[in-house]
Amino acid sequence: MSKQAPAREPIRALIADDEYLGREAVRLGLETESDFQVVGEARNGAETVALIRTLEPDVVFLDIQMPQGGGFDVVEQIGVDEMPITIFVTAYDDQALRAFGVHAMDYVVKPMRVSLRDLMQQLDPGHFRRVHRSTILNIDRVREVQPWFGGDYVVILQDGRLLRVSRTFAPDLLRPLQ
């Protein structure tokens, strides 16, 4: 008779960001991690304080600038010692020292203020290619590329997911690595 390890409870996460796309980005990231369960989302500081008190999450992904109280206001209202594990997710990189001063576990700067063109200039073109107006692809994760309709292509990733490659970016993806 084999012994099975006891099932671990998922890490209960609260996402607090006044921007829908910011919450969506964190939520999508957490959905790929089986250890996390998103238990709530807040759009402002007041909602965040209320949800921390009622839901008692294990971790909060907390935006610094929100209406009705930003991330630091939330920490002040809850109390540094009573806060769940806190990961600040913000578009501003100038508050990191202050964030770690209130025991933040991490500080993530949202790339949303950076254009994909700017981001592509920072990435190694030997590993990353733009395949759509809103998508950058790590070519090391590609299993195969298949032609599709109207000059578009479909990329099949190693994990089986499909990504559409627009005809605008197809020549760049299909060119040999230099």
Image (cartoon, rainbow, N blue to C red):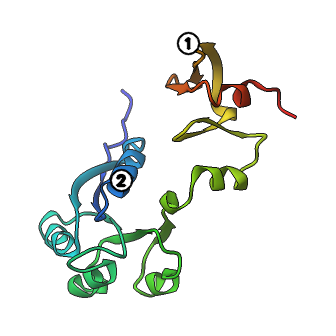
Side of 154 where 40 appears, left or right: left
Front residue of this view, candidates 137 and 41 = 137
Q: Quadrant of the N terminus?
A: top left
| Label 1 sits on residue | 148
Q: Who is closer to the viewer here, 69 or 143?
A: 69
Question: In this rendering, is residue 35 above or below 82?
Answer: above
Of all residues, the one furthest to the right in this rendering is: 178
Amino acid type at image mark 1 = Trp
Q: Residue at x 73, y 24 (%)?
A: 174
Query: Which x, y percent locates residue 19?
Result: 31, 60
Q: In the structure shown, which secondary structural element does the residue marked by tag 1 occupy?
A: loop
Instruction: Give the residue type that dot 2 points to.
Output: Leu
10 Å crowding of disc 1: few (<14), some (14-19), many (20+):
some
Question: Where is residue 18 drawn, in percent x and y?
Answer: 28, 65
Against 64, is 153 above or below?
above
Percent of width and height locating residue 88:
41, 71
As drawn, is 144 to the left or to the right of 126? Answer: left
Task: Say whether marks 1 and 2 touch (CB < 8 Å).
Answer: no
Residue 84 appears in which quarter of the rendering? bottom left
Q: Residue at x 64, y 27 (%)?
A: 142
- The C terminus: image quadrant: top right
Q: Residue at x 51, y 67 (%)?
A: 109
| CA neighbours of label 2 inside 10 A, class few (<14), some (14 to 19), many (20+) | few
Answer left or right for 141 relative to 21. Answer: right
Q: Where residue 34 is drawn, which disc sits there?
A: none
- x and y, in percent, of residue 47 in the image: 16, 69
Residue 81 position by quadrant: bottom left
Q: Earlier in the sequence, mark 1 or mark 2?
A: 2
According to the image, label 2 marks what residue? 21
